[in-house]
Amino acid sequence: MSSTKTLTNLELERKELGRVHIVPEVVEIIAGMATIEVDGVASMSGGIAGGIAEWIGRKNLSKGIKVEVGEREVIVDVSIIVEYGKEIPVIASNIQGNVKEAIHSMTGLVVVEVNVNVHGVDLEQEDKKDIVD
C-alpha cells in the first residue's frame, strides 16, 4: 500500500515541477532538418523571408516549413523543390514519414498531418549531367 502512495506522490511532484512549452519555431527547425535529409529534395521553398535570411548569410533551418502546434498535436506544411528525375510521390512519402518520426521522437507531439507542397523542380542536376556527357 505504501508503494501506491509513493507512486502518487511522485506523480504529484512531477506535475509541480512545471510545464514544458515547445515554441513553433523549434518544431519548424526539426521538420526542416528531417525534410532536407530525404533523397530527392533539392532545396526548401521559403518565399521572401527565407530568401532574405539566406541573402544576408543566415542559415534559415525552418525555411519552407509552417506548423500549427496545439497542446499535444501538430500539423506541418512543407514546401520543397525536388531534384529533376526523382519520383515526387516517393519523395513526398519519405518526407512525411521522416518529419513525423523526428517531431514525435524529439517532442512527444502527435503529428496529425504532414502536407508536402512541391514548388518546383531543380534542373541544375540535369544541366550538369548534360555538360559531362
Image: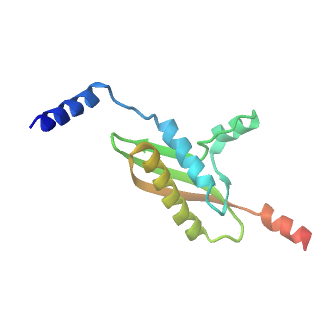
- The residue depicted at 64 percent of the width and 51 percent of the height is 44
Picture quadrant where residue 22 is located = top left
Name the quadrant containing residue 11. Answer: top left
Horizontal and vertical percent for residue 111? Answer: 40, 52
- For residue 94, side relative to residue 112 (left or right): right
Indicate the colouring scheme: rainbow
Residue 132, image x and y in percent?
91, 69
Tell me what residue is drawn at x 87 percent, y 71 percent. Answer: 130
Nearer-the-camera pick, 82 or 101: 101
Expressed as whole percent of the image width and height from the top left, the position of residue 79 reads 58, 53
Q: How many marks?
A: 0
The residue nearer to you, when weighing 110 against 16, is 16
Residue 121 location (% of width, % of height): 69, 62
Residue found at the very far bottom of the displayed protein: 133
- Quarter of the image where the C terminus is located: bottom right
What residue do we see at 28% from left, 30% from top? Answer: 14
92 w.r.t. 25: above or below: below
Q: Quadrant of the N terminus?
A: top left
Q: Is residue 13 left or right of residue 5?
A: right
Query: Can you name the residue that lies furthest to the left here?
Result: 1
Q: Residue at x 49, y 42 (%)?
A: 27
Q: Is residue 127 left or right of residue 54?
A: right
